[in-house]
Structure formats: structure tokens, C-alpha cells
Amino acid sequence: FIYIIRSWFSSVQPVPSLQCKSSFGSVRMVRTIISVDANLSVRDQPSGAVLHNRWHPDIPPVAHVGQGEIFRVECLDWTGGQVRNDDDATDIKNIDLSVIHILSGPIHVEGARAGDALEVEILDVQPLTEREWGFSGILDIHNGGGFLADKYPHAHKAIWDFEGIYATSRHIPGVRFAGLIHQIGRASCRERV
């Protein structure tokens, strides 16, 4: 996914209004601070794509942004691209769970200090051009399973094709929904780890 973001570090500073169109219109050119290649595994990403799998103060920032700066971050899915756009759930069955929860960053907001509240405004979310689809799945009982593993013990997946903000699936006909799932967080200060 591609996130267009504006950040602030003070919980008392209001975020000024911004005239920035969504993915349905033109978005002004903003600086891309993290790029990924959706066709490469996590380990094979270019050096500019610094990916990790936890929020921790020992992971140094890979990019710095100014307060109020609008910037772009590219991200892989939580599996790091292990799932393919096909009708076979073998990839879900065999997900390498030691390389999951893939995050882009960390990103440092200039002037922010430990203990400051961060306000992040997500201005737009778009799929990567080469990966305009997502997935949902059920892990196999022999590889992580789930809380309903007794009812659904085998791996299954549904591929969702994005059309604007809507998603439809050839695996679940007749369903169309709006919305994208995303997650942003911050590392705790050392005293809280």
C-alpha cells in the first residue's frame, strides 16, 4: 500500500486544513521516504526499503520528516508478499510465520521527543500499482491456525481486487465492500520496554 501522510508531534497543536485530493483526483507530488518493490521478498528489497516487524526503540529511524510535512510511505502486506494472486491456498498454508508483521520505517518527526503525542493524518491510501489486490485467509491448523481452528482446520484464502475504495473477490461472489485496513504505531520509549 501507499500512504500519503502528514505528521505532528504536539497533541495541543491543531492540524491546519490541507487542499489535497484523494486517489480519485490528482495528489500533489510529495516526497517518497520509503519505497518497496512488491515483486521482491522482504529480504530482497532495495536498501531504501527498510522493513522490520516490531515497534522498538532500538530500531533507528530510516527517514526524517518535518512537522507538518506531507510524505509518502510504501508498504508490503503483513506477510511480506508471501501470498500470491491465484486460486491455490498452499501459500497461506505454508506462510513463514518467522517473517511476518512487516512494517515500513521507523520514521522520525523532527522536533519530536520521547513522551510527545504524535498526531498522524492519513491523507490517502492506495494499493501499489503493481499489486492492486489484497487477500484474506485462514491459516492451516499445522501452521498457526486460528481461534476457530477446530471448525476451519485447513488453509483457505480469498483474493480481493481493488477498484477505488471498493474490493470484490472472485472467491466470494456478490460481496463488495468499502475500506482499507491499515495500521500505524509508534515505538515506546526505553523506560516502557
Image (cartoon, rainbow, N blue to C red):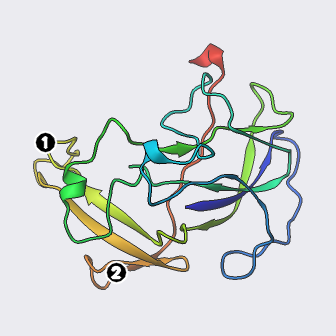
Q: Residue furthest top?
A: 191
- Image location (x, y in percent) of residue 124: 67, 66
Looking at numbered disc 1 in the image, what kind of residue is underneath it? His
Q: Is residue 189 above or below residue 121?
A: above
For discs 2 and 1, the disc positioned in front in the rendered view: 1
Which tag, 2 or 1, sits closer to the chain's start? 1
Who's the residue at 53% across and 56% down the image?
182
Instruction: In this rendered view, identify the residue nearer to me: 182 or 87.
Output: 87
Instruction: In this rendered view, identify the residue nearer to me: 28 or 137.
Output: 28
Q: Which residue is mark 1?
A: 142
Q: Secondary structure at mark 1?
A: loop
Q: Is residue 2 above or below residue 164?
A: above
Instruction: In this rendered view, identify the residue nearer to me: 26 or 19.
Output: 26
Quadrant of the image occupied by residue 176 = bottom left
- Image location (x, y in percent) of residue 94: 21, 48
Who's the residue at 11% across and 54% down the image?
151
Q: Secondary structure at mark 2?
A: loop
Q: Residues within 10 Å of mark 2 (few under 14, many from 20)?
A: few
Looking at numbered disc 2 in the image, what kind of residue is underneath it? Val
In screen coordinates, is 46 left or right of 158?
right
Q: Is residue 160 above or below residue 58?
A: below
Quadrant of the image occupied by residue 64 = top right
Who's the residue at 35% across and 64% down the image?
135
* Quadrant of the frame with the C terminus: top right
Q: Which residue is mark 2?
A: 175
